[in-house]
Image (cartoon, grey):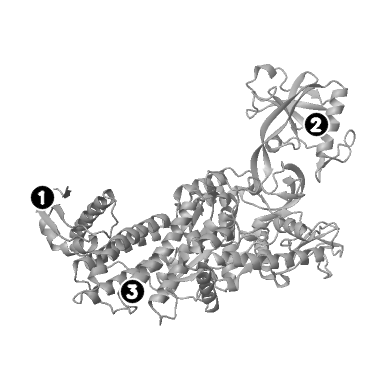
């Protein structure tokens, strides 16, 4: 039994200790913008699916002669890390000084990175793990702050008091990037607005009502448009207005505009320039009269009780409807007004779509998601977060005149919250200076990954990078923000190609989740099947498509590992453990396998160049299993003992097998490294740095069709033995074979030797068959 654990450890140590995958810049370089995983969770099977897909290309490109820059990083700042640290260390910002809280977050992040690094390395990822970056380091903070100041100078980053999206649970502003739609159960409350009945799912926002809206085509309300009605309980008047966006079928067809109950409220408010009434702040409602500083849930109960006591409620219905939620916690978002930092992007939608057109998308249809996102943008990108462990804004404010004070580049990295340097306002001379306490959105730093990676090795001349590999679920976040930042800072695309992967589902088509109990740890797969089998499974789908975790795919990968090992054992046995020198094939069977190999090299290479890994692997599987193992190795068992063709046959067998190993190497690096070294005991390098097989048209031989015909005959004899319930090694005393007598007679020694036929009668015929 093959010991995959020992083999994997052996070669992981060898690669790491010998810096096999370290980047050495040359004339022919290939750069990858690696997704930096967060430190707030374990490596999951989705990672084990998507990351090998980029590693396949990294390893392939090295073998094609490229100097591959395959960096590694961890995204360890922001809300996910805070939540992770608070759970692990039982600390919160409420009971821990800010400086200590930041240090604890950094400490936990470093500890987590060690385990995560090992998990990714165990899958055979060939990134440069010795020189990884993390987004909370001084290096990353400095660059992120520099790029922020660059946007301020270009008037692309600005601070404004404006409506913003907020998450009540996470207690921070979020951006449109971080929202997702969800269906929730709630109550639809019907309220009598002194003559007009309205329906709302947000009765707690009644004190923020600034207008009633109906559809202009709704005959029921035309007489009310332009009039005013008094808001129940509060008694102040609001105008009845019309807008085509109002759904006549929802509720009563009339709805109140509150500042702000949802995004539609905000859109109407902006469109008609209505004065706001703000009662929601810091996730609490305070209308100054009925509801005094109450949480949203309590405020809802309070206003419903008040409306019922005054007979304003007509009825309450239980409904399900779609709301915007925060993707990280699933909480319905709220909209408030406060000062936030934004990156201006709504005015450059056309430019961003055009930039997307300059990038090659694999698969191509995934670009539609990017286009739809850009087209549908409704907000500038809010990058302020009311959190603590993140990249600080290098900003202070004059408490006297409100002037914004920016750090100089020479001061970076800087944390104004902890900075003790005395500062004065250049505008008014006041020394009453207060720091910005917000931190930047995590994506504001992650979106700079190409810059972070290349500046880390002082090679910005390699910008733009060649490829970005990522999941389709973050096209609207990571891909979009990276393209945006590249456009704003450099005026060019961040990478030439973006390759999209899908999601992982269980064998029944269910998305994997902890709540469903169908999570499978990559470590368990590696222990049971080996890392090569896991990587083999990752090659069983096309780019961008979702994949099921099926045992048969893992077993197929495991069997391929074993088949490769057994093939080498057979060749070594036939050669008495001595590898012969190279020869040019002259005998038909050797020419046939050489021709098949060359055709496979050509096909596999074309697929790999197009990121069609699954097609490349299927083509290679077919050649290895069917043509090389099932037919060629069986045919040469007798040939290798004949003096006149022994050296040539064994030379061909070794040469073809080594090319098979090289073509499998990007997908299954451990077993191919092991067997390549076994076949070449004096070899001191790595198969991963060997030249990838190149197609040679001069090695296509005419004998291909003849041997194909003979293999067809062999298949018929195999079928006959199966029908007779005989093993393939069982002898046949006599066989009457109809077919092309000339070809059969030319290769009769192969048929007799391989299929153990004592006597064969050959009858010339157009049809090929065995006479009963």
Residue marked by disc 1: 765
Mark number displayed over residue 448: none
Please tell me which residue is depicted at 40% across the width and 68% down the height of the picture. 565
- Answer with left or right where residue 509 lies relative to residue 757: right
> In the picture, residue 432 is in which quadrant?
bottom right
- Answer with left or right where residue 670 lies relative to residue 255: left
Closest to the observer, 266 or 719: 719
Please tell me which residue is depicted at 80% across the width and 31% down the height of the picture. 206
**Badge 1 local density, few (<14 within 10 Å), some, or many (20+)?**
few
**Badge 3 local density, few (<14 within 10 Å), some, or many (20+)?**
few
Mark number displayed over residue 206: 2
> In the picture, residue 633 is in which quadrant?
bottom left
Q: Secondary structure at mark 3?
A: helix
x, y (%) of residue 442? 67, 57
Closest to the observer, 487 or 612: 612
Is residue 348 among what the camera can see?
no
Mark number displayed over residue 573: 3
* Comparing labels 3 and 1, the label whose residue is closer to the camera: 3
């Amino acid at each position: 039994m093959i010991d995959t654990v020992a083999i994997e450890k052996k070669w992981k140590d060898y690669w790491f200790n010998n810096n096999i995958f370290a980047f050495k810049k040359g004339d022919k370089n290939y750069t990858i913008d690696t997704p930096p995983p967060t430190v707030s969770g374990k490596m999951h099977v989705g990672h084990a699916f998507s990351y090998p897909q980029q590693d396949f290309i990294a390893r392939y490109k090295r073998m094609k002669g490229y100097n591959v820059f395959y960096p590694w990083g961890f995204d360890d700042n922001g809300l996910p890390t805070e939540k992770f640290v608070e759970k692990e260390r039982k600390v919160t910002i409420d009971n821990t000084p800010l400086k200590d809280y930041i240090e604890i977050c950094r400490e936990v992040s470093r500890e987590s990175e060690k385990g995560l690094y090992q998990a990714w390395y165990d899958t055979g990822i060939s990134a440069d793990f010795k020189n990884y970056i993390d987004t909370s380091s001084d290096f990353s903070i400095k660059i992120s702050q520099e790029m922020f100041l660059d946007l301020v100078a270009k008037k692309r980053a600005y601070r404004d008091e404006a409506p913003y999206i907020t998450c009540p649970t996470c207690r921070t502003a979020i951006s449109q990037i971080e929202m997702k739609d969800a269906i929730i159960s709630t109550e639809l409350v019907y309220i009598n607005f002194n003559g007009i009945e309205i329906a709302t799912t947000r009765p707690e926002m009644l004190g923020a009502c600034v207008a009633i809206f109906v559809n202009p085509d709704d005959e029921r309300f035309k007489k009310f448009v332009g009039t005013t009605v008094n808001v129940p309980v509060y008694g102040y008047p609001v105008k009845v207005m019309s807008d085509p966006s109002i759904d006549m079928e929802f509720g009563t067809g009339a709805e109140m505009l509150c500042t702000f109950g949802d995004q539609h409220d905000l859109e109407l408010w902006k469109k008609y320039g209505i004065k706001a009434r703000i009662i929601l702040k810091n996730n609490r409602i305070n209308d100054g009269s009925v509801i005094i500083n109450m949480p949203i849930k309590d405020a809802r109960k309070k206003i419903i009780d008040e409306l019922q006591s005054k007979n304003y409620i007509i009825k309450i219905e239980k409904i399900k409807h779609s709301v915007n939620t925060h993707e990280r916690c699933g909480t319905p978002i709220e909209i408030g007004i406060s000062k936030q930092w934004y990156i201006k992007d709504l005015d450059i939608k056309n430019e961003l779509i055009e930039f997307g057109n300059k990038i090659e998308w694999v698969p191509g249809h995934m670009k539609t998601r990017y286009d739809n996102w850009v087209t549908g943008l409704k907000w500038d990108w809010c990058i302020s977060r009311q959190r603590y462990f993140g990249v600080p804004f290098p900003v202070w404010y004059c408490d006297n005149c409100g002037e914004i004070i920016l750090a100089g580049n020479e001061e970076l990295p800087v944390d104004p919250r902890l900075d003790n340097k005395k500062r004065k306002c250049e505008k008014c001379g006041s020394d009453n200076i207060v720091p910005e306490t917000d931190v930047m959105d995590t994506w504001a730093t992650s979106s700079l990954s190409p810059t972070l990676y290349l500046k880390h090795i002082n090679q910005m001349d390699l910008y733009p990078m060649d490829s970005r590999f990522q999941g389709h679920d973050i096209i609207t976040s990571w891909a979009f923000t990276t393209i945006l930042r590249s456009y704003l800072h450099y005026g060019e695309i961040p990478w030439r190609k973006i390759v999209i992967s899908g999601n992982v589902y269980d064998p029944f088509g269910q998305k994997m989740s902890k709540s469903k109990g169908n999570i499978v740890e990559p470590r368990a797969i590696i222990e049971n099947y080996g890392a090569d089998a896991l990587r083999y499974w990752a090659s069983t789908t096309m780019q961008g498509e979702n994949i099921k975790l099926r045992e048969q795919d893992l077993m197929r990968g495991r069997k391929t590992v074993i088949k490769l090992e057994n093939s080498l054992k057979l060749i070594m046995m036939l050669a008495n453990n001595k590898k012969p020198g190279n020869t040019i094939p002259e005998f038909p069977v050797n020419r046939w396998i050489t021709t098949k190999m060359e055709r496979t090299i050509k096909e596999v290479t074309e697929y790999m160049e197009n990121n069609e890994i699954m097609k490349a692997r299927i083509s290679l599987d077919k050649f290895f299993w069917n043509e090389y193992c099932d037919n060629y190795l069986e045919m040469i068992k007798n040939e290798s003992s004949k003096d006149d063709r022994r050296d040539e046959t064994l030379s061909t067998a070794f040469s073809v097998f080594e090319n098979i190993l090289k073509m499998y190497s990007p997908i299954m690096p451990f077993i191919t490294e092991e067997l390549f070294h076994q076949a070449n005991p004096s070899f001191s390098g790595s198969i991963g740095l060997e030249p990838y097989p190149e197609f040679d048209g001069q090695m296509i031989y005419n004998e291909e069709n003849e041997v194909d015909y003979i293999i067809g005959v062999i298949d018929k004899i195999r079928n006959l033995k199966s029908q007779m319930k005989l093993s393939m090694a069982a002898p046949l005393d006599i066989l009457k074979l109809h077919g092309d007598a000339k070809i059969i007679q030319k290769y009769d020694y192969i048929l007799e030797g391989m299929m153990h036929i004592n006597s064969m009668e050959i009858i010339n015929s157009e049809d090929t068959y065995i006479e009963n």
